Amino acid sequence: MNSPKSNYTILIVEDNQSMRDGLLASLQKEGYSVAGVADGQEAWSLLQNQRFDLIITDIKMPGLDGLTLMKKVKNLAPMTNIILITAFPTVDIAVDAMKCGAQDFITKPFALAELRQKVEALYRRKFVQLKPSLSEPEFPDLIGNSPAIRQIRQLIAKIAPGDSPILITGESGVGKELVARLIHQASRQKNGPFLAVNCGALTETLLESELFGHEKGAFTGAHKTHIGKFEQSNSGTLFLDEIGDMSTALQVKLLRVLQTKQFQRVGGEKFIASDFRLICATNKNLEKKIKDGEFRSDLYYRINVIPLTIPPLRERPSDIPLLVEHLLRLKADRLGRKIPRIEPSVMARLISYSWPGNVRELENFIERALVFIEEDIFSEKLFNFGDLPENTSLLNQTDTPAARDLTAQISQIEREMIIKALRDQHGVKQRAAEQLRIKPSTLYYKLDKYGIKPEEYE
């Protein structure tokens, strides 16, 4: 009987025959369906008639080099995974590889076991549903593989089983409600309701009625009894978004509910008990609002038992290609369109743009682009639509804060490379330095420079 891995097709592009034969034998032994060619031009000819799940290619080859081949492949088949092989690892290569869509790269000399591990990870991502675990929890809806997102996954797995109040902070559009829902789904309350209320979208009177409910005749227009969110969320989770916009008068009433787990409907006399888990979120600086007298410190300490911060998209550019791929699949399916190809130059601009609206802005951009494109390709024309919002025209590498601060982007990539090497070598710094082809002293300097803690790679 064929191994399940035989459905995973791999193309090896390597001009060194002995190395190519070694890679072929090693991966075939694992059960994969593997083919090999001697150069980029031969690979490109083969790809005109055959598709592969993964291409492993050397960068330095005569004729069509690995980076150029990768750019052509991403135009032809954007969902193809690519691992680059290089003997000269630099941050510039990492930047180019990421912008052009490489999933990973490996440096010569390398152990076959190291390559097999990388291939296994890509195979499992496509074909195997991993079970959640505290060591590497799986939350498929939380897209990204940056250290920040990996840390958030770890934190969700750790805090979800409890019932302590959680405060999620982050800019608008980063996905605070998504994280709240994931916490609920992994919690003991998962079989109960998840109810969300935007505190900034309602007036004080309407918000009070929405939370507490009201009795029939409590005020003009109250023609029937209304069950509020406190009551509806019993045995579940209540998510209060933009808690920083709640009036101080309502803050006092909310504090009392949290202290007693009881409340009265507006116009009612009976006390109603409700056992819900509270998750709050805000894009405001609540500590500053406390100093300004706009937020109660006693409520802040009550809701901020477990803090969780989601970084903006501009601080994790390596997540953008994964988000684009996910959103394209999602939106194309909903709009009944084919998943378009993305020109490498377009992906580079998406990565370099600062995305002030974060993931929500990226999502809107993808949807608008799918509506406007006439062919199944994302090209430079996307940035010239007069109908698109003005800020979309700012997707220009020469005119964005992220592009102007290229050093910050490179530092982020270098930090992620160091963490990955430490994970690959199980925290052994000497071996991690060898993998990165830097001196151990340089590695220790960069660990201090980037504030990399053992919990990020152990």
Image (tube, rainbow, N blue to C red):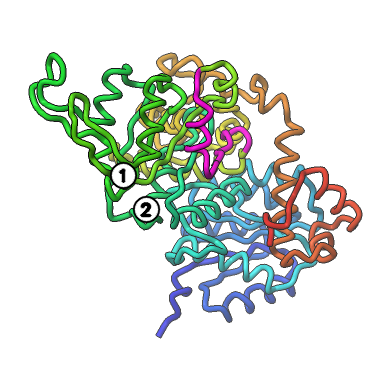
Residue at image position (43%, 28%) is 243
Q: Which contiguous range is marked in magenta?
A: 294-315
Q: Earlier in the sequence, mark 2 or mark 1?
A: 2
- Residue extending farthest left: 223
- Residue extending farthest bottom: 1
Query: For the residue carrying disc 2, how many other residues have a C-alpha within 10 Å: few (<14), some (14-19), or many (20+)?
Result: some
Query: For the residue carrying disc 1, how many other residues have a C-alpha within 10 Å: few (<14), some (14-19), or many (20+)?
Result: many
x and y percent of residue 398 in the render?
A: 67, 22
- Inspect the magenta stretch and tell me whether residue 100 lies in it: no
Residue 228 relative to residue 381: left or right? left
x and y percent of residue 230 in the render?
A: 28, 37
| Of residues 420 and 71, the one drawn nearer to the viewer in this rendering | 420
- Inspect the magenta stretch and tell me whether residue 308 lies in it: yes
Residue 88 relative to residue 181: left or right? right
Tag 2: amino acid: Gln
Secondary structure found at label 1? strand
Tag 1: amino acid: Phe
x and y percent of residue 201 in the render?
A: 34, 21
Tag of residue 66: none
x and y percent of residue 68 in the render?
A: 66, 46
Q: Is residue 92 above or below residue 255?
A: below
| Residue on which the image places disc 1 | 194
| Of residues 268 and 344, the one drawn nearer to the viewer in this rendering | 268
Residue 192 relative to residue 168: left or right? left
The answer to whether marks 2 and 1 mark residues whose Cβ atoms lie closer than 8 Å is yes
| Residue on which the image places disc 2 | 185
Residue at image position (68%, 27%) is 403
Rounded to the nearest angstrom, the CA distance separating label 2 from label 1 is 9 Å
